[in-house]
Image (spheres, helix red, strand yellow):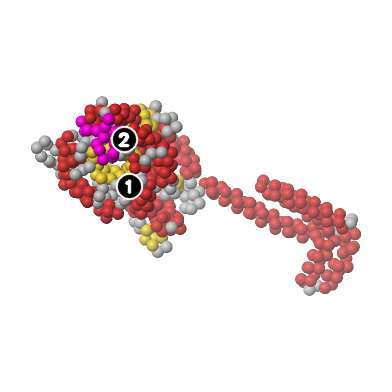
Amino acid sequence: MPLALRVTLTAIVWSVAIATHLMLSVAAGGAIVLVSLLAIAATAWLWGGAVGLAVGVAVGAAEGDLIRTQLAIGALPELVRAGHLFVPVTFGLIGLALGSTSTLRRQIRVHRDASDRAQYDVLTGLLNRSTFEARLEEWMRTAAADRPPMFAVLFVDLDRFKFVNDTFGHDVGDHLLRSIARTLRDNVRDEDIVARVGGDEFVIALRGLRDRETAAVIAEKLVKLLSAPFDVDGRAITVSASIGIAVYPRDGESVTALTKSADYAMYAVKSGGKNAFNFSTAEMRVSQTRRLDLERALRNALHDNELELVYQPQVSLDDGRLVGLEALLRWNSRELGLVSPTEFIPIAEEAGLIVPIGHWLLREACFQIRTWQAYGFADLKVAVNVSTLQFRQPEFLKQVTEAVADSRIDPAMLEIEITESVLIDQFELAVQTLRRLDRMGVRTALDDFGTGYSSLAYLQRLPIGTLKIDRSFIAGLTLSPTGQSGSVVPIIDAMTAMGRKLGKTIVAEGVETEAQARYLAQIGVDRAQGYLYSKPLTAAKADALLRGLVRAGSAAKRPSSRPVTSNSDAIVLMRD
Ligand code: C2E
Ligand code: MG
Ligand code: MG
């Protein structure tokens, strides 16, 4: 056979063999052996002499047996002619056997790894969520045979894990998680299930419980163990854990329901101060269900036009003229009715929905300002509440710039209200953002002043124009017509004096009585907002109020220092 043909045939045989090998290696080991065997046999047939020679020389030389080497060389033509292909075939088979067993071994390992990954959490070696759920389902099917048919699910969430991760890095965090996993596993019985179901979330299922108390005893032990310092690379790291307990079948008859109940109970521990355990209750489940209903409905609220802004007037305590309005969000859900912002805004924040909602309402308010600006209310300010999450978004400033530009308003008519929570952890970033707003000509106000992170040091450095004394202080201002009373008086006095010294405009929220208004005016509060003047008004009503003021000739095209209206006018109109 000509050499060229031999080379071509060999190339074809091996191409087919390798391609088939690759395809089959995904499926099964046995077929690979067969394909490889055929390829070796074909090669041996095509190149038998040469391979035999090479092997014979190599073996002979290795053994120093020159005679056998020469024999091999000399016998080669004979062997080929006689069709003795046993040397190359034998060596081919040995190679093949070695190769395929290592392939097989590798395949078995890959297979085992894949099934481990499907069952276990790679980091801690505990079960993962899906295996946990499958085992729990199995327990539910067989629980009827237990006396009593009861078991508990403990939802364990670490309290300070994010802090550890952020401060010491992920390696330390991972190490800590492994130690915690070991602690959990070592402190329950072998037949109990321990799984990791999220970053720092673990679940434990305890079977064969005589009563709920047993679960409480174990939870208490775990809380104590997890609050002790862990040694991570020579560093003592302390976290703690919040544990929620749900008992089957009382707190849920499906895996999802039972786990959720434990999760809600854990949340209750978190909001109650952490580092403890709590049993699931029916009230928790109801409030969580409400929360989930709200979140689900809120996802469509913007799209379904269920959100609306209302506007609450602010008056000058000097002369009673209308100096501003605060835009307040309202949600009239088709499904759930009117929902208070104090209820849905925290949910919108947690679900990340506040960012698109906040963007929408900022633009909505700016276009409303545009209308009122056209009426001639040049010195009117419209305050927009901005949640901390929205304020910290990198796009926030761009959104404000665009809203102002698109609506073509005087930026000084827009006042951004933030709360003290934007200052926590990220003070410098907040200062920067506030400075940029100031450079754009947009006003800024600190809402709910006095209820949060108030510190005199930060206040002095804060580039903010207005302080809004929180409603809770004003509510405590119970003044008789003859004199003043209430323990909040010195606080309100001090906040006002300090704010004025720092050059801030002071606004009092929640002013409900004439006596409060008089007192606040007397101590130098600049503006007031509250039911005494007006409840929040729909955009249409606020618009009618402003148009009324224009008609009364008290607004349009006036220099900004002149009163827009008299206090009594405003009150009469607003109380409509
Ligand atoms: P806030 O910004 O401090 O708004 C003042 C709240 O006090 C408003 O409640 C207002 O209706 C109420 N209020 C005003 N005057 C009086 C009064 O004389 N007496 C009493 N009892 N209450 C008065 P509302 O509209 O229910 O809003 C509650 C909170 O929800 C707001 O407090 C604010 O933190 C948040 N919120 C409202 N709208 C928005 C919004 O558009 N965006 C964001 N991020 N938060 C908003
Ligand atoms: Mg506000
Ligand atoms: Mg407020």
Query: Tag on residue 206?
Result: none
Camera-side mark, 1 or 2: 2
Image quarter of the C terminus: top left
Looking at the image, which residue is at 83% across and 53% down?
9
**Which residue is pictured at 81% across the width and 65% down the height?**
54
Ligand 2 within 8 Å, label 2 CB = no
Read off the magenta span. Answer: 553-568
Q: Quadrant of the N terminus?
A: bottom right
Within 10 angstroms of label 1, few (less than 14), some, or many (20 or more) residues?
A: some
The tag on residue 421 is 1
Choose the circle earlier in sequence order: 1 or 2.
1
366 vs 57, nearest the viewer:
366
Q: Is disc 2 placed on a helix, strand or loop?
A: loop
Amino acid marked by disc 1: Ser
Left or right placement of residue 39 versus residue 449 in this view: right
Question: In terms of image quadrants, where is residue 343?
Answer: top left
**Where residue 114 appears, x then y in whole percent?**
57, 48
Question: Percent position (x, y) of residue 389?
Answer: 38, 45
Query: Is 433 displayed left or right of 48 in the figure?
Result: left
Residue marked by disc 2:
557
Residue that sits furthest to the left in the current view = 482
Mark pair 1, 2: CA separation: 39 Å
Task: State whether residue 303 is above or below residue 226.
Answer: above
Task: Say if the magenta span includes residue 4.
Answer: no
Residue at image coords 29%, 47%: 465
